[in-house]
């Protein structure tokens, strides 16, 4: 459980809200965990109080903790019911937000129904698509049955279901969502506020940052490094494929693995590079590309990533289509001169900052609207 400090809104006439968030993702451990770690502090000034209930590495450890198949770094954990009940009693939320279909998410949905509170659901991960990469047919069927049932229960009960790219609309409609809204992705404040380093005038170093997992297509990064010995490739992150990828890169002097990076080290990695690589098989959004843009770095991103659905971000994105050669794409970028890199840097930062501001305003408005509807219906 990760509570956020209380902050009373200055405008008492606006009737600031109390909101409870439930997530099965560890803070900053994956894209979903990072999303709310970045969002909640920016919502605090406009709310009366809020709390995030999610797994934590802090003691005491939960009685139930199961490693996810295919990646022991991802875990399904049982929520501490007594502690959550105590904090919810203090919080007395007016809106409940559920962001995952696991045990924490189901607890949040149950609490909202029991108390008659409006429920907002967020759909960040297409688990059924991931299952096709990780599990054999029988295990895949079982995972899809369990996760699909949870998603249907949550989506059908939610006043509003949030997605971060329009391509997910059909999926959540199939789960029974009555009202669907596309929302943006926030940034950690450090990515916008920390003094920045000017972009290099030529492409000599590129980076990847994320989970070293099948859906990320990191093997394409290593193949490009093999073809471009004059470019340094830095790979940040942990995951089930790390050993296999290190073996694939053996003997390549221009490839370096950093392991897991905290946010400060991630900024250092991005700032020291000219370009971020994200050649994934699919991404519901691709938050790391937005973070790179906030640091003034363009991102070469697979066209399978949802971030391409945001026209305002296109000035900072270099599309990479399946079947293309990553090395060929990078060679074309090596022809850019210093002036073009500097123009990209300015455009990237402006687009990322604008989306962050719009995302915070959108979240504030939707929470107020959901709570306002509930008040009118109960009046």
Image (cartoon, rainbow, N blue to C red):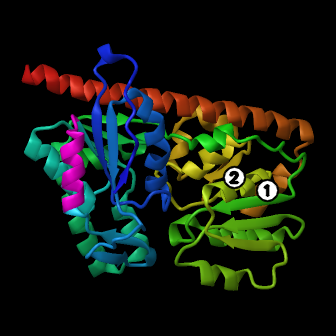
Graded by Cα atoms within 10 Å as few (under 14), some (14 to 19) or many (20 or more), the crowding at tag 2 reads some
Q: Which one is in front, 367 or 203? A: 367
Q: Nearer the viewer, mark 2 or mark 1?
A: 2
Q: Is residue 284 above or below residue 293?
A: below
Whether the residues at callouts 2 and 1 have beta carbons within 8 Å, the answer is no
- Categorize mark 1 by other alpha carbons within 10 Å: few (<14), some (14-19), many (20+): some
Q: Which mark is residue 330?
A: 1
C-alpha span from label 2 to label 1 = 22 Å
Q: On the image, numbered disc 2 is attached to which residue?
A: 267
The residue depicted at 38 percent of the width and 24 percent of the height is: 9
Depth check: give the residue in front, 53 or 252.
53
Vertically, is 240 above or below 39? below
Residue in the image at 28% along x and 47% along y: 172
Is 86 in the magenta?
yes
Residue 349 place in picture, x, y as percent? 69, 35
Q: Position of residue 24 (x, y in %)?
A: 33, 60
Q: Quadrant of the C terminus?
A: top left
Location of residue 146 by image quarter: bottom left
Task: State the extent of the magenta-drawn residues as a range.
Answer: 82-94
Q: Earlier in the sequence, mark 2 or mark 1?
A: 2
The stretch drawn in magenta includes residue 24: no
On the image, the x and y values in percent for residue 302 come to 60, 54
The quadrant of the rendering that contains the N terminus is: bottom left
> In the picture shown, does residue 149 fall above or below 179?
below
């Amino acid at each position: 459980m990760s509570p956020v400090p209380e902050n009373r809104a200055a405008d008492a006439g606006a009737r600031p809200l109390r909101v409870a968030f439930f997530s099965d993702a560890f803070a900053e451990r994956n894209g979903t965990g990072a999303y709310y770690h970045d969002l909640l502090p920016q919502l605090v000034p406009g709310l009366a109080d809020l709390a995030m209930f999610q797994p934590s590495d802090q003691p005491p450890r939960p009685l139930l903790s199961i490693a996810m198949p295919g990646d022991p770094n991802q875990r399904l954990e049982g929520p501490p019911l007594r502690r959550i009940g105590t904090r919810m009693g203090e919080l007395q939320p007016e809106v409940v937000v559920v962001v995952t279909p696991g045990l924490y998410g189901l607890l949040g949905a149950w609490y909202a129904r029991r108390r008659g509170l409006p429920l907002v659901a967020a759909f960040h991960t297409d688990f059924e698509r991931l299952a096709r990469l990780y599990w054999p047919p029988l295990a895949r069927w079982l995972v899809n049955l369990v996760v699909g049932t949870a998603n249907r229960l949550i989506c059908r009960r939610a006043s509003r279901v949030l997605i971060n790219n329009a391509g997910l609309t059909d999926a959540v409609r199939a789960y029974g969502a009555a009202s669907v809204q596309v929302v943006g992705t926030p940034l950690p404040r450090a990515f916008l506020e920390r003094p920045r380093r000017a972009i290099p005038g030529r492409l000599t170093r590129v980076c990847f940052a994320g989970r070293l997992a099948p859906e990320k297509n990191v093997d394409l990064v290593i193949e490009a490094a093999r073809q471009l010995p004059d470019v340094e490739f830095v790979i940040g992150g942990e995951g089930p494929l790390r050993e296999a990828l290190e073996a694939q890169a053996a003997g390549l002097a221009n490839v370096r693995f950093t392991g897991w990076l905290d946010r400060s080290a991630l900024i250092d990695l991005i700032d020291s590079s000219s370009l971020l690589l994200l050649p994934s098989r699919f991404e519901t959004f691709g938050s790391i590309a937005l973070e790179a843009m906030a640091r003034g770095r363009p991102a070469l991103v697979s066209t399978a990533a949802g971030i391409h659905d945001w026209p305002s971000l296109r000035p900072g994105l270099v599309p990479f289509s399946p079947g293309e050669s990553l090395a060929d794409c990078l060679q074309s970028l090596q022809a850019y001169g210093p002036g073009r890199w500097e123009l990209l840097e300015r455009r990237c930062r402006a687009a990322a900052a604008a989306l962050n501001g719009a995302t915070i305003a959108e979240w504030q408005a939707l929470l107020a609207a959901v709570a306002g509807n509930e008040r009118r219906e109960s009046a």
